[in-house]
Amino acid sequence: MSFSFNDFYEANRRIIIWLILISLLWTLSDFFGLIFITFVLAFIATPLVRMGQSRLKMPYRLSLILVYIFFLIVVVSFFRYVTPNVIGEANRFLNNFDEVQLKLIELERDIGSKYPGIERSLHGYMRSMLDEQALQAIDTELNAFKKSIYLASDVDPEHMLEEELTEATHEKIRKYYDKEAELLMNFLASKQLDKVGEHFPKLINQLYTGIGTVLLALLFSFLILFDNIRLGGLMKSLHDSRLRDFYQETAQPVIRFAYVVGRAIQAQAMIACVNTFLTLIGLMILGIPSVAFLSLIVFVCSFIPVLGVFISTTPMVLVALNTGGLMLALAVVLMITIIHIIEAYGLNPLIYGKHLKLNPVLVLIILLVAYHTTGMWGMVLGVPVAYYFIHDVFGVPLWDERRLGPKV
């Protein structure tokens, strides 16, 4: 029996078509960011344009142009004002670094006087973060300092609590510990500054890449919506072309998946609003200045999974360090940690569950698995992809339908 390609294609048409689609998506993986942001902007712009049509009685294209002018103003304003402010706070922190370092040493000294065991553990942890060359340099300077304060070489600072040591010896050991803390902090700061200097060009490059991606997404989504009727007709014309099998097999699932992703975006917008509100309350309680500016950063960055937390936290910590010192910065970090625990284990499952009608526990499991397997894109698309496969592919009933039971 001879092999027939037509018979093979007819028997495996669905599998072949979906393999081709997956291969195309994999080929375009480098453009996922651009494609996703374009879709998000188009999804957000559509109801705003309709609002301009219905309430303000404007023509479709005029309403669309006004919406995208607003988008452009928001994007340009964000990068125009946010970036200089963050750089300014960073420069202020660097200029006040000596003062911050003195406050850290004073804090470490207070902790050491109350809890000597913690001080040694803290010094040991800082030592573990340095390489052998730095540790040798620190020990060399400590030995020289030990001689300069006439601390006997046979006196072990580890035994400073022993009663047979004189008060003068205790004071010398205290100076020894302060010098050790100062050296450790200096070397750690130098190490971190070197890392910042090493990665700074990459961060600048990523910033400009991100700006370019957002502007391109604005342009593409505007052109798609501006000429959506003709583009829709062009897509429908595939039904009568040689690609009709591909169109018939993939059109409805792709549209359905796009709808699910849109619902996920709505859920993320609600989470961003609640997250921003909680952060605003926390900043006001802590007395942090520039509350409106910092809250705007939090709202925008709430749409960036995982990395958004670090991006929005950086300016808040810098402002807190420059305003109230280390303790206020630690309070800000604690506040952000609590808010994001609430977001991760409370808001995400409940709001995603309500919008996509998934069990909140299942949503939490999906988010954890997606993050650890595929990183940022897993956090973005993990829930809608899981929803699509659970309900549209496998036909599992929706969560609220199962709770209410079958309809009579």
Image: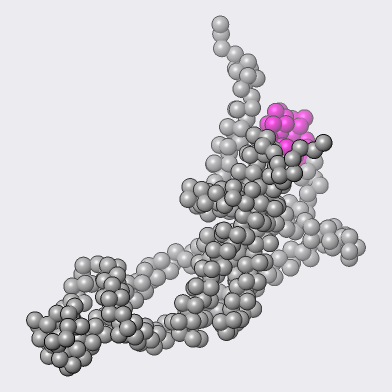
Q: Which residues are magenta?
A: 234-252
Indicate yes or no whether the magenta region holds residue 246. Answer: yes
For the N terminus, the image quarter is top right
Report x, y in % for residue 183: 26, 80
* Residue in the picture at 20% in, 69% down: 133
Indicate yes or no whether the magenta region holds residue 215. Answer: no
**Which image quadrant is residue 338 in?**
bottom right
Question: Image height check: is 219 above or below 96?
Answer: above
Q: Residue furthest right?
A: 57
Instruction: Return the residue nearer the eye: 161 or 129.
Output: 161
Report x, y in % for residue 72: 69, 67
Q: Which color scheme did the rendering employ for the protein? A: one colour
Residue 351 in sight in this render:
yes
Instruction: Return the residue nearer the eye: 50 or 221.
Output: 50
* Residue in the picture at 19% in, 89% down: 170
Question: Image height check: is 159 above or below 349?
Answer: below
Question: Image height check: is 71 above or below 42?
Answer: below
* Residue in the picture at 17% in, 93% down: 168
**Which image quadrant is residue 253 in?**
top right
Report x, y in % for residue 340: 55, 65
Residue 378 in sight in this render:
no
Q: Residue furthest top?
A: 1
* Drawn side of residue 241 relative to residue 50, left or right: left
Q: Which secondary structure is most common in the magenta stretch?
A: helix
Instruction: Return the residue nearer the eye: 408 or 358.
Output: 408
For the C terminus, the image quarter is top right
